[in-house]
Image (cartoon, rainbow, N blue to C red):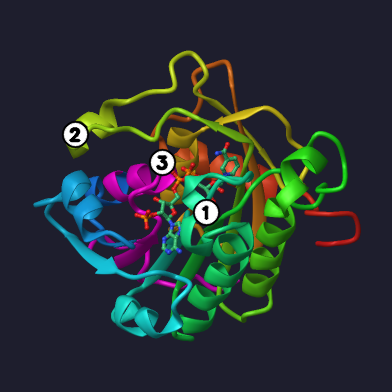
């Protein structure tokens, strides 16, 4: 596979959709810390300002992903897209205005995928454990309002788009969202004694995943060519883990990428 250059270089511009959310805020802070430029996409300019106001290398794109007309301007000059948007699996205030799983996990992802220029270097989509097991307990309960079905439909939209993609599927998320309004404080959070990582090419994990681990995995996979077109299920477990060591992350991804993703799928 040829190496696509550009996205891994400091100075590359990454659009983070869901930048004000739990995973998105950590991805944004980590990318800024490592010299990337980040365009934080949110429906709320106030939230972006509160979380990241004044950070060097940060710009904001105020857009609702359900509204395709707002997306071309947000994507102008972007090298990489990281999408970590979401809503609750069950009815809540966050569904107000129709922002339910169908609209957030499928329609919005579809709109973002379709708005990307063909020159995009990489699209990293965060979905969930259980997208291929939505009929099986306990995922069948989580999927009562369709969240896993719609997340899988979002994945399929990306898989069929022709864009270079990576899909990350966490278990139930822990650690965050954080309410600190300071990037350095945000970066100092840890997942305690559960810093080790399980990666799987199949949708076969259960348990918990630290948002810190998901964000670090996303940042670490950006320069790796061999992860392209792959799905990675990610879990957190007791132990030290790779931390921010690029060589250790590369080994973890490489071991996972050598295995088949699903029965019969290379
Ligand atoms: N919670 C779990 O246990 C769990 C488990 C597995 C996977 N996941 C998935 O992992 C991902 C990250 O989860 P998280 O809990 O860290 O995220 P989160 O805190 O729920 O943040 C989601 C973000 O999505 C943005 N968003 C929602 N609707 C939008 C729209 N119509 N247009 C633009 N932005 C929109 C919101 O930003 P604004 O309000 O600023 O617009 C929000 O900050 C999500 O896909 C989630 O479904 C979650």
Q: Nearer the viewer, residue 221 or 103?
A: 103
Q: Position of residue 193 (x, y in %)?
A: 48, 13
User: In the current view of this chain or complex, which residue is farthest to the left?
Assistant: 54
Q: Residues within 10 Å of mark 1 (few under 14, many from 20)?
A: some
Q: Which residues are magenta?
A: 1-29
Q: Is mark 3 within 8 Å of ligand 1?
A: yes
Q: Residue at x 53, y 63 (%)?
A: 98
Residue located 20% across and 39% down the image = 183
Residue 119 % position (x, y) = 44, 84
Label 2 CA crowd tier, 10 Å (few <14, some 14–19, many 20+): few
Mark 2 falls on what kind of element? helix
Q: Is residue 204 above or below residue 166?
A: above
Q: Which of the pair 99/83 is nearer the observer?
A: 99
Q: Is residue 18 above or below residue 207?
A: below
Element on which disc 1 rests? helix
Residue that numbered label 2 is attached to: 184
Q: Residue furthest right?
A: 264
Q: Which mark is residue 95?
A: 1
Residue 238 is drawn in which quadrant? top right
Q: Is residue 258 visible?
A: no
- Residue at 53 percent across and 69 percent down: it is 108
Decide if residue 94 is on the left or right side of residue 63.
Answer: right
Is residue 9 within the magenta segment?
yes
């Amino acid at each position: 596979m040829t190496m696509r250059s550009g996205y891994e270089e400091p100075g590359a511009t990454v659009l983070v959709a869901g930048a004000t959310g739990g995973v998105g805020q950590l991805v944004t802070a980590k990318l800024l810390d490592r010299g990337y430029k980040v365009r934080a996409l949110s429906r709320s300019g106030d939230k972006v300002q509160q979380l990241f106001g004044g950070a060097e290398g940060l710009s904001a794109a105020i857009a609702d992903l359900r509204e395709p007309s707002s997306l071309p301007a947000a994507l102008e000059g972007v090298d990489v897209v990281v999408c970590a948007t979401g809503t609750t699996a069950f009815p809540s205030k966050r569904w107000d205005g129709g922002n339910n799983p169908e609209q957030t996990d499928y329609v919005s992802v579809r709109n973002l995928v379709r708005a990307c220029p063909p020159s995009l270097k990489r699209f990293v989509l965060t979905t969930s454990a259980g997208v291929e097991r939505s009929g099986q307990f306990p995922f069948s309960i989580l999927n009562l309002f369709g969240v896993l079905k719609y997340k899988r439909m979002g994945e399929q939209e990306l898989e069929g788009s022709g864009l270079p993609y990576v899909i990350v599927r966490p278990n139930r998320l822990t650690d965050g969202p954080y309410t600190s309004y300071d990037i350095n404080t945000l970066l100092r959070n840890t997942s305690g004694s559960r810093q080790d990582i399980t990666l799987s090419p199949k949708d076969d994990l259960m348990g918990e995943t630290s948002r810190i681990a998901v964000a670090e995995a996303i940042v670490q996979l950006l320069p790796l060519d061999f992860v392209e077109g792959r799905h990675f299920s990610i879990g957190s477990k007791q132990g030290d883990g790779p931390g921010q060591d690029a060589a250790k992350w590369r080994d973890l991804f490489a071991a996972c990428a050598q295995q088949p993703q699903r029965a019969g799928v290379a």
